[in-house]
Amino acid sequence: MNITDAAYNTVHDHPGGASALAPRMGIKSPAVLNSKVNPNTDTHHISLVEASKLMAITGDPRILQSLNAEHGKVAIDLPVIPECRDSALTELILNMGIAGGDIQAVFKEMMADGRVTLGEAMDMSKVIHTLHMVLAELDAQVHACVDEKEKA
């Protein structure tokens, strides 16, 4: 699905459609919102801020998923860890996702010609090593979040 279709479907699949969403998004009328997401309309377009607000209000990530797919990327949900609201832990999870994305890109490039050279294998090893380091740090941070009562 392309981003235009994703925006259209996000609005029209939401209960109440544009009539329910337009006022919550600060758009003057449902007709304007419908025009902004209509793939056949050239005069109105949804802005990035509006797309973000639309996803936040609806809880529907299809616009983001379409953008990611178009660019060969993926998005991951951040973990909700109520016992340990540690921004360093969240940062580690993000780094793991970023490193994981690198491993996929390196693998795709490595396999493009159907053979693996020593240089390509070494490049892959570097990415794997980076992932190991991030995972080891993540393991340490998760254990640091364990409640003191459970440690005793």
Image (cartoon, grey):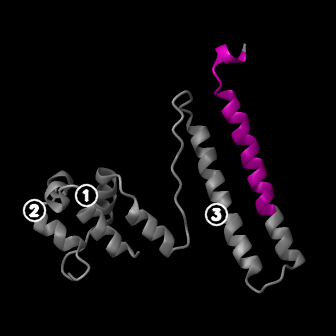
Categorize mark 3 by other alpha carbons within 10 Å: few (<14), some (14-19), many (20+): some
Q: What residue would you read off at disc 3?
A: 101
Q: What residue would you read off at disc 2?
A: 29
Q: Earlier in the sequence, mark 1 or mark 2?
A: 1
Q: Amino acid at mark 1?
A: His
**Quadrant assignment for the C terminus:** top right
- Mark 3 element type: helix
Q: Earlier in the sequence, mark 2 or mark 3?
A: 2
Residue under the image location 52 percent in, 59 percent down: 75
Camera-side mark, 1 or 2: 1
Gap in Å between the C-alphas at discs 1 and 2?
16 Å
Residue under the image location 12 percent in, 63 percent down: 30
Q: What residue would you read off at disc 1?
A: 14
For residue 90, above or below residue 36: above
Instruction: Indicate yes or no whether the magenta region holds residue 141.
Output: yes
Q: Which residues are magenta?
A: 126-151
Q: Badges 2 and 3: C-beta atoms under 8 Å apart?
A: no
Residue under the image location 64 percent in, 63 percent down: 101
Q: Earlier in the sequence, mark 1 or mark 3?
A: 1
For residue 137, above or below residue 60: above
Percent from the top left, x then y, of residue 123? 81, 69
Q: Amino acid at mark 2?
A: Ser
Percent from the top left, x then y, of residue 12? 23, 65
Gap in Å between the C-alphas at discs 1 and 3?
31 Å
- The tally of labels here is 3
